[in-house]
């Protein structure tokens, strides 16, 4: 009888990915790339101040996007956690009514223009602080097309308009702001919501400036301006962009 030859068991491959796995990963990457260009959310700004030195300005290079400081030296700095919070925050201070500068933390997005942008940020506004404001800007921050004022009575005002006042937020406690900003070829719609303990309110606002300004949206400012004094803190700034779909 002839001896039967047995095939040696296949040895596992080492030091590399299988061809099939490479194909799957490649297809997944291609799908995600096409999806991002076809109406799926993309993060265009994300802050993290935990590795920044307390007392100094926030780092320019954020995990996604760029942060910059405008105003007087030392007016916008990294601080430790306010009461009831954790991690580093950025504090914006306007110390005197004689200061001419608008003290600003500027968040530059990696992409902007038309689309649906969702801003989420944590705010901490102490009792007695002046108006803390959030501005939506275009043209590298040179043109504002909408802003929110967090007023001393605990309400929020849109675009300095007394008919656009809503909500309730606490002083001396953290709360969350969310703004879903939808920019099209014909209008801007901002769906604004407040979240947190002792916090409530939502409001829908539309553009009160020429639409062309919003169509170049690329920047969000957290600021305190004339004639207000005091400080407020911000942390956890996240902006996602859902571009218009290109599907037919």
Image (spheres, rainbow, N blue to C red):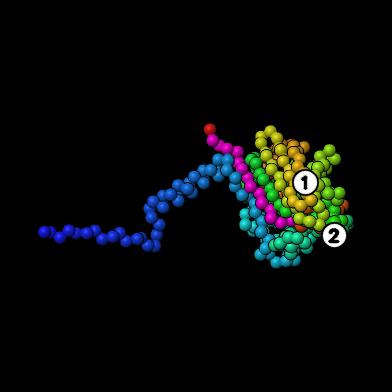
Using the image as rendered, state which of residue 100 and residue 58 is in the foreground: 58
Q: Position of residue 173 (x, y in %)?
A: 79, 56
Q: Quadrant of residue 16?
A: bottom left
Q: Is residue 137 visible?
A: no
The CA span between labels 1 and 2 is: 29 Å
Which SS does the magenta portion mostly show? strand
Q: Quadrant of residue 10?
A: bottom left
Instruction: Report the residue marked by disc 2.
Output: 95
Crowd class of label 2 (few under 14; some 14 to 19; many from 20; radius 10 Å): some
Crowd class of label 1 (few under 14; some 14 to 19; many from 20; radius 10 Å): some
Among all residues in the image, which is located at the extreme front? 1
Mark number displayed over residue 50: none
In percent of the image, x 64 and y 58: which residue is there? Answer: 61
In percent of the image, x 76 and y 40: which residue is there? Answer: 203
Q: Is residue 137 above or below residue 207?
A: below
- The residues colored magenta run 234-247
Indicate left or right for 89 with 31 as reference: right
- Label 1's element? loop
Marks 1 and 2, the one that precedes in the sequence: 2
In the image, is residue 241 part of the stretch drawn in magenta?
A: yes
Q: Position of residue 122 (x, y in %)?
A: 72, 53
Q: Position of residue 112 (x, y in %)?
A: 64, 45
In percent of the image, x 73 and y 66: which residue is there? Answer: 54
Quadrant where the N terminus lies?
Answer: bottom left
Q: Is residue 188 visible?
A: yes
In percent of the image, x 39 and y 62: which residue is there? Answer: 15
Q: Quadrant of residue 67?
A: bottom right
Using the image as rendered, state which of residue 167 and residue 45 is in the foreground: 167
Q: Position of residue 242 (x, y in %)?
A: 61, 43
Instruction: Report the residue marked by disc 1.
Output: 200
- Label 2's element? loop
């Amino acid at each position: 009888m002839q001896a039967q030859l047995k095939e040696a068991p296949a040895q596992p491959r080492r030091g590399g990915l299988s061809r099939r796995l490479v194909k799957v990963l490649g297809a997944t990457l291609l799908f995600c790339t096409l999806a991002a260009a076809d109406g799926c959310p993309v993060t265009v700004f994300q802050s993290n101040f935990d590795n920044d030195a307390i007392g100094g300005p926030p780092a320019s290079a954020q995990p996604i996007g760029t942060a910059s400081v405008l105003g007087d030296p030392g007016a916008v700095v990294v601080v430790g956690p306010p009461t009831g919070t954790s991690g580093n925050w950025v504090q914006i201070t306007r110390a005197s009514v004689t200061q001419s500068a608008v003290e600003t933390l500027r968040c530059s997005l990696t992409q902007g223009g038309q689309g649906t942008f969702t801003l989420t940020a944590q705010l901490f506004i102490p009792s007695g602080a002046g108006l803390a404001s959030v501005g939506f800007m275009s043209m590298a921050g040179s043109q504002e097309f909408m802003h929110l004022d967090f007023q001393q009575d605990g309400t929020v005002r849109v675009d300095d308009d007394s008919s656009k006042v809503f909500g309730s937020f606490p002083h001396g406690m953290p709360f969350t702001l969310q703004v879903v900003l939808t920019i099209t070829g014909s209008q801007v719609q901002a769906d604004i919501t407040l979240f947190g303990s002792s916090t409530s309110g939502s409001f829908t606002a539309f553009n009160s400036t020429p639409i062309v300004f919003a169509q170049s949206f690329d920047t969000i400012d957290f600021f305190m301006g004339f004639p207000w004094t005091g400080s407020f803190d911000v942390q956890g700034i996240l902006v996602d962009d859902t571009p218009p779909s290109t599907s037919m």
